[in-house]
Amino acid sequence: MKKIIYVLLLLTFFSIVTFGDVLDELDNPSAYGISMGGALYTVFAGPQSIAYNPAGIATEGGFFFSHVEHYLGVIRNDFLAGSLNVGNFYFGSSMQTTRSVDVSDLNYSQYIFSGAIAYRIKNISIGTDMNGFFGTDVVNGFSMDLGGIFQTGNYTFAAVLKNALASITWQSTPPTVENYPTEMILGVGYSSSSFDVNTFVNFTSKEFGAGVQFPLTKFFSIVCGYKGSIGTQISNALNAGLVVKNYLGFDLFVSYTFLDSANFGQLLSPFTVSMNYNFGG
């Protein structure tokens, strides 16, 4: 009974939040991104970059999968992405599903389908992706992301216009069409042999984040990060994670999130696990 109440409250929340809020919840589906405080905009992270900065897919191709559970496991989110390159061009696509489970009398789901392309010359990459939204409470929706990454020495700079032209048609009688503002995101990163630091600021949603990665061996790293917001507590979170990097071509990311009481839903499922396979081995 408690699960049903939680889900009904959650769906009511989904029905009244703005499209930007829905996108913000799903823009951080990677355990690596979560443990870095969401600061993955300056990283060439392969397929998972479709959810952050499309310019970041401009690295060796591969497959990526992530699974997240919320609200006592009643709501589950899966993110599957892949990418490959042809010369200096990189192509990627992804599918993200959010659905209710274990509640027989409730059928709820949302889907995001994305296609991305990036072009990279040495230390400069630009990219874009287009996203389509569908679900039980969404007739259809559309958004577009534009991003760039520039490396110079040990520093990396990123700029992203996220959710450009964002529009969603909600299920209602008659259907309700809403448009939402483009989010402007800037990021800065620093890389050395002993640690990597990445940061971002979202000037539209007033969110910010920072993460640090410390390599312990050739294959293992620990990560910690913080994501916060100005004027609200809903996004504040302290994160920690472990990275098993490029072992037989596989990357494993595990994150644990320490959240405040405003995030009670995720507090009940603080673990996130992601896996990546690199075509380059």
Image (cartoon, rainbow, N blue to C red):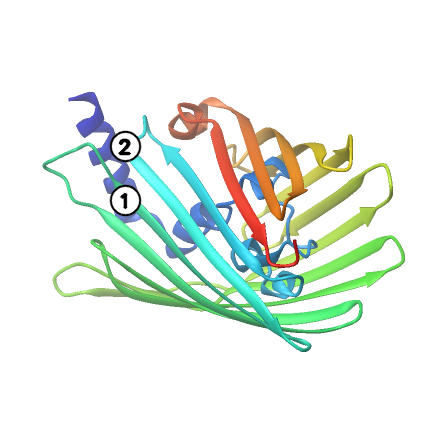
Task: Determine which of the numbered discs, if any, sits on residue 74 in the image.
Answer: 2
- Residue 238: x, y in percent? 60, 28
- Residue 112: x, y in percent? 37, 59
Neighbourhood count class around disc 2 (C-alpha, 10 Å): few under 14, some 14–19, many 20 upward: some
Quarter where residue 177 is shown: bottom left
Alpha carbons under labels 2 and 1: distance apart: 8 Å
Q: Nearer the viewer, residue 122 or 131?
A: 122
> Measured along the vertical axis of the image, is residue 105 above or below residue 40?
above
- Residue 46: x, y in percent? 61, 57
Badge 2 marks a residue whose secondary structure is loop
Task: Determine which of the numbered discs, if any, sits on residue 99 in the image.
Answer: 1
Q: Nearer the viewer, residue 20 or 107?
A: 107
* Outermost residue toward the right in this view: 153
Quadrant of the snapshot with the N terminus = top left
What residue type is disc 1 on? Arg
Q: Residue at x 73, y 45 (%)?
A: 198
Q: Nearer the viewer, residue 5 or 252?
A: 252
Task: Determine which of the numbered discs, if any, sits on residue 200 in the image.
Answer: none
> Measured along the vertical axis of the image, is residue 38 above or below residue 214?
below
What residue type is disc 2 on? Val
> Measured along the vertical axis of the image, is residue 198 above or below residue 141?
above
Quarter where residue 180 is shown: bottom left
Q: Residue at x 64, y 54 (%)?
A: 45
Left or right placement of residue 76 versus residue 173 in this view: right
Neighbourhood count class around disc 1 (C-alpha, 10 Å): few under 14, some 14–19, many 20 upward: some
Badge 1 marks a residue whose secondary structure is strand
| Mark found first going from the N terminus, 2 or 1 | 2
Viewer can see residue 230: no
Verify CB contact (< 8 Å) between mark 2 and mark 1. Answer: no
Q: Residue at x 62, y 54 (%)?
A: 203
